[in-house]
Amino acid sequence: MGRRRAYGRNDRSSSSLWIVILIALIGAGAYVYTSKSFERDAPSIESGKSVYWNRKDPLKIKLSDVSGLKSYEIKVRDDTNEIVVANEMILETVHEKIVEIKYPKKAVGGVLLDPRATKLQISFTATDKSNWNFFQGNSVTKIINVHVDYKRPDINILSNSYSITKGGSALVVFQVKDRALKSFVVEAGGLTFKAQPYKKEGYYATLLAWPFNVENFTANIRAEDMAGNKRISNIPLYLLGKKYKTSWIEAKDKFIDGKISDLIDTEPKYSTIENRLEKLKTINETMRLDNEVIIHNLSTNVSNEMIDSWKIKKFYPLKNGAKVASFGDERHYFYEHKENEISQSYHVGLDMASTRMAKVVSSNPGTVVYDEYNGIYGNMPMIDHGLGLYTLYGHCSNILVQKGDQVAAGFTIAQTGKSGLALGDHLHFGVLVQGVEVRPEEWMDTKWIRDNIDKVFKEADKIIDAK
């Protein structure tokens, strides 16, 4: 009987030991599976399965891992040979690394890649510092197919305006081609201009603008392909300088207490301003800039739709309209004497006046993009005529169109008035090219349109249609 009781106690002790061991194993397993040092995610190699390479610039590929990068090896092969171009052990703790792969121009271990090969293959293997896999870490291998391309994109300028005036516009029609084109942009006067597809694939047309307050001007087309090859082509424009008027205007109390204060009252955030001079500066500068942001944002859109032609006639928005203020005027406002200048601004349109509440017409068809009150511009319809050309009509008493309306040439869109920052009944006529104010006088001149728009398209059409 005693022996049986001893045997039972030993059995219970053995069972307890196994339970302890089992709990320890479960705990150890839980630790391994939950600990960051035993994470099981392989490093990330951020690259597509297929890339382009010009061989001049290194390929840049990003490596990343949660537990840290331990090593990587990179092999490049052509149809026959394979070369190890990188093999690095990373001693410090690094979670992200940009690896640059340079094309091996010289033989490595007596092996040289075929310089004529247009297709290569990269084998990229990376290992992390995780304790997983018996402390060997997680590894990944990625195969990347490489298209070798060292030819720069072609840019062919078919035709362009002969000249451009400071503050004016120009047109260019061109071709960009490459088997793997990434992007291209037209740069002019420090700004970029979007081109619209024209007639056939690979052909484009764009209007340019030389900002009236920018002295130096160049125009280029810049293209880049998927391999990083780049080309820049100059647009040959003859530059015509122009000096714009500078005006000094006395700001009188009657003007500030009247029109300026009325505008202050239209904007709640300015309602606490009491000082006369601060009121004028706020309206003439702060409100003006806010209003122009709306205008610039509305006038930057250029359609991606291919066009077969683009026709424009001279603008004549106000019958028998007489010019009362020019485009590009630099205006300085002073109080009591010139030495006390309180505000400065530019006049970016052409002011015209005829009779009170005269009809305002759209000389060319287009789409109404704005039909509201816009601060100093007052009631201001705005029209998109295509190819990045926009017109606006400020200080109107009544707007007779709505946003989204398609208006025909000669359609009455508004009536003149003195809304906004206007002392007398007149029209502020503005023209913009992709958000840049330009000289309205050019777009009101039949000869200028014929020489700088119609002839350019006609010359380009001969080349395109012949292909």
Image (tube, helix red, strand yellow):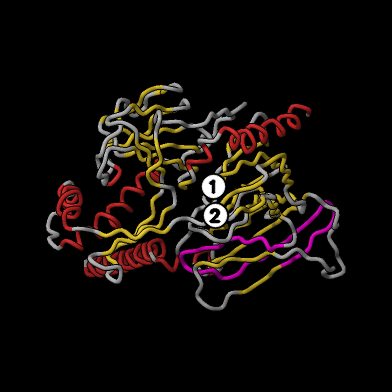
Q: Which residue is mark 2?
A: 242
Tell me, yes or no, if residue 420 can be seen here.
yes
Which element is circle 2 on?
loop
Q: Is residue 226 left or right of residue 370?
A: right
Q: Amino acid at mark 2?
A: Lys
Above or below, 339 against 78 in this view is: below
**Highlighted magenta segment, given as a residue range:** 57-85
In the current view of this chain or complex, which residue is farthest to the bottom? Answer: 91
Residue at point 24% right, 64% down? 335
Which element is circle 1 on?
loop
Circle 2: is it few (<14), some (14-19), or many (20+) Cα within 10 Å?
few
Residue 442 x, y percent position in the rendering: 53, 40
- The quarter of the picture where the C terminus appears is top right
Residue 355, located in which quarter of the rendered image? Answer: top left
Q: Is residue 431 left or right of residue 455?
A: left
Residue 3, located in which quarter of the rendered image? Answer: bottom left
Looking at the image, do the residues carrying marks 2 and 1 touch, with CB atoms under 8 Å apart? yes
- The quarter of the picture where the N terminus appears is bottom left
Q: Is residue 328 left or right of residue 172?
A: left
Numbered-mark total: 2
Distance in Å between CA atoms under marks 2 and 1: 10 Å
Q: Which residue is mark 1?
A: 168
Q: What secondary structure do most residues of the magenta stretch adopt? A: strand
Residue 367, located in which quarter of the rendered image? Answer: top left
Residue at point 82% right, 69% down? 108
Above or below, 131 against 375 in this view is: below
Task: Return the disc, 2 or 1, that comes first in the chain's sequence.
Answer: 1
Tell me, yes or no, if residue 3 can be seen here.
no
Residue 147 x, y percent position in the rendering: 73, 49
Q: Amino acid at mark 1?
A: Gly
Q: Nearer the viewer, residue 295 or 331?
A: 331
Residue at point 31% right, 48% down? 291
